[in-house]
Structures are given as structure tokens and as C-alpha cells.
Amino acid sequence: MATSIKPRVNGYTWGCGLFAAVGSLLYGIDSGIVSTTIAQKAFIEYFDPFTPSLKGALVSTFGAGSVFGVFFAGWSADYFGRKRTIMIGAIVALIAGIIQAASINIGMLIAGRIIGGFAVGIMNMTIPIYNSEIAPPHKRGMISGLHAQFVGIGFACANWVGFGCSYSHGQFQWRFPLAFQCLPAIIVLLGVFWLPFSPRWLLEQERDDEAYAVIKRLHGNTGDDTFFRAEFTQMRDQLRFEKSQQATGWKDCFATKSNRKRILLAVLVQAFTQLSGVNVINYYQTDLYKGLGQTGHMVTLLAGVYGLVGPIANVICLRYVDTWGRKKTLWITGLIMSLDMVLVMGLSGAYGKSSNTVAKGVTIAFIFCFSIIYSLGYNSIHYIYVPEIMTMAIRAKGSSISVISNVLINIVFNQVSPIAFTEVGYKYYSLFICTNLVGAVVVFFIFPETKGKTLEEIANIFGDEVIVADLATVKEKVGHEEDGNDVVMVEDKEAKKDT
């Protein structure tokens, strides 16, 4: 019986995953910067009257731009490649940051937010795919999860920039935070040329020699050469087989029962992520703190601290996600988030308008706990799970469909949440108690586990035909080949039939 192969992940692979994830800072900074910016006194005065409807529009139009960015990336990631699509996202993000920082009216600011959303949609879809395709199976969760980790770091940075700027005066108080969005875009543009292309995308383009060279480099060009050739052979032959069986158009995402199941699971995990209520708290936390009696600099200080707890908890998730698995972590997280929402709603209802400062402090603590719980589960896993359950033929387009479902739900919540908090107050939390419970039940009953398998082997879970064996078996076969310098093609399916 073949044993599993778990080679050491070398520094080059970690470096590529970490640098690609710098683009993920854009999502965290661009989405987080608005929560503190709209709370700045100078901002409110400059754009007066800044009504709840305008507030909702400013936040939600960012998501609208993201929808178009995700659609674009679904095509671009296949046509131009993952690497070039990340570069395009960085260029668009730089333009968006400049427009927002230079805004002279609310219309210009909203336009900049839409363009920024377009860039974030590109990054949010492409970076998890890129990292999943360069990562070895036993560390794919950790490396793919770097996207969510850097999103959290970006959000934390945005909150602290907002806190620092709250001590400044005049337009600098809100223009500098908006300009800060340009920083990660500039970093990505300066370094993206040194990133390798995804080896699976190179194989898709039939650039086999380049793909093999990238695989070797991702393993440090050291070690057992038969392992490099086995990994290459497994990727190439399964990809060639899948390519011969189906095209790569949008309709092919729904052409087979297995693909329809993949799309359903991908959409569900992205939907449950938004239905958890995490972005409602992220975007409108400053309003929540004000509603609990906090004023002045304390509001932005709490937002800064809130932004830190998530990334810290997410480090724990990244460390253990390849041990815990995806399914168990998701449904347990859903149950605990629901319980936390019960406590937040109960405390807000009982003490929100009282003079009991201790109870209000406990309420804020449970808001922080929600971020911790979410970051231990959903935050990284919904980015990990979606790319790994897709075949190469539909990975980009299938991922984009799922991310769009995430964005559309986010847009709805961003627009209605200010109104909902105004009209029904703390009772609004009851919605998320229900959605988190439903999410936990659905994940428990229908989600398959994917940890530890190569992207090619996962096809077995969905009942697809897989013409290559597990990696250890392929390695054993390749090792027996007489010519150790050439990669010998595995017989294709038709040849086997003829034999």
C-alpha cells in the first residue's frame, strides 16, 4: 500500500505564497478603512449631509464593483494566468486609491470605491487559487489561508490608521487613510514579476517544460527527482484527461452532476460566510460602539483593537487547519458564532440604553469574541475550500461564481444594515443567530472533507473518473522508469482501451 508523501515546504514556496498574499491586504485595507473613515468628524463635515442612505451606498457600492472584478478575474485568470491577473488587480487598486484620496464630492468618492471594489474582486478570487495551486497537499490549507490572514492584517492596519488619524485635523484626517490603500498595490506591482506562474496553469497552456521547472523550484530544486516527476505526471495527465472530457466555458460549471455539486458547495460556504454577520460588524462596528455609550477616540481605539484579535486567532487556524480538517472546523464554528450572537443580542437589549458600563463592556467583549470565533473557522476556510474542490477546467470560473454570491449578499447587508440598526436595533442580531445555525447543520450533513489530498485526488470525492493514482503510487511507477532524465507520458485513457 502506498504511503503518503509529505516533503518539507521550502522557503521559496512560502515566499511566493506570502508575497501573493500582500495583494490580499488590499481587501482588508479597502474594506476596513471605510469603517473608521466614516466616523471621522472632518469627513462628516466635508460631506455633510451624510445620511444613513449615503453611508450604506458608500459601503455597498464597493461590493458592486467587486462583482464585476470577480467576473473579470474568472475569465482573466484562465486567459492571462493567475500571476498577470494579480498584477492587473494591483494596477486598478492604485488608480482607485488615488481617486478616493483626491475626492472633492461624494459622487467621486463612490466612483473610487466602485473601482476599488473591482480591484478587490480580482484579488479576492485569484490569490486563493494561485496559492492553492503552488502549495503541497499537506500544507495547502495553511498556504491558501494566507489570503484570509493578510485580509485580516489589512483590516487591522486600516483600523489603526483610522485611530491615528482621529488625532489629526482637517482633510488629512480622512484623505490619508484613503490614500493608504495605494501602498499594497505599489508593493505588488514592484514584486509581481518575480512570482512564478502557476504550474497547473502552465500545463493548461501546454508549457510543460516551464511547469516542470516551476515544480522543481517550488521544492527547492533539491531532493528525490522522482518525486518532482511524479507530481508533474499526476498534474499533467489528470489535467489532460479532464480537458479532453469537458471544455472550460461558463456553462461547463453546470454540465455534470459532480460540477453542479461543486458549485453548490462553493456557493453555500461563501454564502454562510456572509450570513454569519461578520461584515455587518466589521463595517458598522463604530456605530455599535457609539450605541453602547462609547465616544470620541475610544470608538476608533476599540475598532483598532477589534481589528487585531481576528488575525491573531487566524494564525491558530492556519497552524491547525490541515490537522482539524475543513468540515469539522466549519460546522463547530457556526454553532459557536450563533451562541455568541445570542449573548450579544441579549446583552444589547438588556443594557444597551442603561447606565451599566460593566454590562456594556461585556457586550463589547462578546463582539470581539465573535471576530475571534469567526477567524478560527470561516475566515480562512472558505478561501481554502472553494479552489480545492474545483477541477482545473472550472477552477477560475467556478470560484468566481461562488465569490459573486458572497459579494451580492454583502452588498445587501451593507445597504440595509444601517437602516435595520436604526429601525429594529439589537433585534437585528436574531437574523444571524438563525443563519449561523442553518449553516452549521448544512455543513455537517452535506460537506465532504478534503484535507491532505492533492487537487487531482479530490476529484474522487465527487465521483469523477481519475486516471492517475495517488502521488505515492505515481512516484513508485516513475521511479521504475529506465530513463531518469525524461518524464514519461502516462498512457491516456484511449490507449488503455485499445490495449
Image: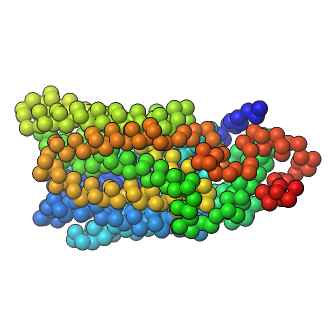
**Residue drawn 46% across and 60% down?**
401
**Residue drawn 60% across and 44% down?**
461
Q: Which residue is more in the foreground, 21 or 387?
A: 387
Q: Which residue is more in the foreground, 87 or 118?
A: 118
View extreme (right): residue? 482
The quadrant in which the N terminus is found is top right
**Residue drawn 45% across and 63% down?**
70
Q: With 203 as the anchor, is 318 left or right in this view?
A: left
- Whether residue 454 can be seen here: yes
The quadrant in which the C terminus is found is bottom right
**Residue drawn 13% across and 64% down?**
48
Residue 285, given in percent of the width and then of the height, sits at 24, 46
Residue 419, given in percent of the width and then of the height, sits at 16, 55
Q: With 150 as the anchor, is 170 left or right in this view?
A: left
| Relative to 235, residue 452 above or below | above
Residue 255, given in percent of the width and then of the height, sits at 56, 63
- Whether residue 235 can be seen here: no
Q: With 289 as the anchor, is 214 left or right in this view?
A: right
Residue 306 location, quadrant: top left
Colour treatment of the image: rainbow
Q: With 427 as the anchor, is 391 left or right in this view?
A: right
Residue 400, given in percent of the width and then of the height, sits at 48, 60
View extreme (top): residue? 358
Disc tally is 0
| Relative to 47, residue 300 above or below | above
| Relative to 433, residue 396 above or below | below
